[in-house]
Image: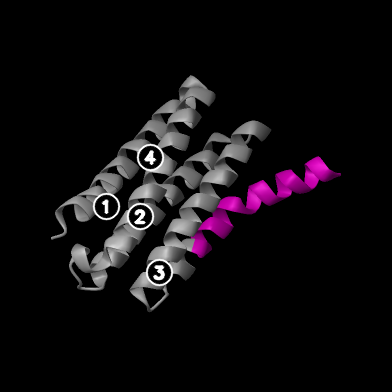
Amino acid sequence: MRTMCFFVLMAALPLAAGTALDSVKQEPDPVKRFQRALALADSTMQSASELIRAGGSKAELEASLNEIADASALALRSLRDTGKKPAKMAKEYKKGELATRSLLKRLGDMALAVGFEERGAVEKTRDQVTITHEEFLLGVMSGK
């Protein structure tokens, strides 16, 4: 019974994840949108890890990975939407840098845990999150 509930929940994950990102995009305050996007990326990463452990489908995994990349990019875009220089928002940029670094580490571990067929999707997501991470790091370091 418990396993069945888990699989029903995982089957609904891509649908719920898409609406979650849309909900985050609707947040009018860019700083709150940034925070919610990072939280969404983290929770989706946890769900993707559980999906791998449970042996979920490749389509569900790809949907989760796309959600992680989109949420981390939305977090960066939200900070830029404030119109403030990174030096004025150093705390937020540092939080984004730390969160994306954590995602990168977990994506690296995930790439080793999945089969060969799924590895390309994980590496693609890792590359996208790497770009976002470097942008956060640039904001922290340059202060421009």
Quadrant of the image occupied by residue 139: bottom left
- The residue shown at (40%, 56%) is 71
Color style of the picture = one colour
Q: Real-space Cα distance between discs 3 and 4?
A: 21 Å
Residue under pointer 4: 125
As rendered, which of 60 and 27 lies closer to the eye?
Answer: 27
Q: Which mark is residue 136?
A: 1
Amino acid under label 2?
Answer: Gly
Q: Is residue 55 visible?
A: no
Return the disc, 3 or 2, that comes first in the chain's sequence.
3
Q: Are dots 4 and 1 in contact, CB under 8 Å?
A: no
Residue under pointer 3: 33
Depth check, mark 4 against mark 2: the one in front is 2
Q: Are dots 2 and 1 in contact, CB under 8 Å?
A: yes
Return the disc, 3 or 4, that comes first in the chain's sequence.
3
Return the disc, 2 or 1, that comes first in the chain's sequence.
2
Amino acid under label 4?
Answer: Thr
Q: Is residue 12 visible?
A: yes
Q: Position of residue 8 (x, y in %)?
A: 72, 49
Return the disc, 1 or 3, that comes first in the chain's sequence.
3
- Magenta residue span: 1-20
Q: Position of residue 4 (x, y in %)?
A: 79, 43
Residue under pointer 2: 96
- The residue shown at (64%, 32%) is 53
Q: Residues within 10 Å of mark 4 (few under 14, many from 20)?
A: many
Q: Real-space Cα distance between discs 1 and 3?
A: 16 Å
Q: Residue furthest bottom?
A: 28
Amino acid under label 3?
Answer: Arg
Queried whether the magenta region covers residue 19, the answer comes back as yes
Queried whether the magenta region covers residue 30, the answer comes back as no
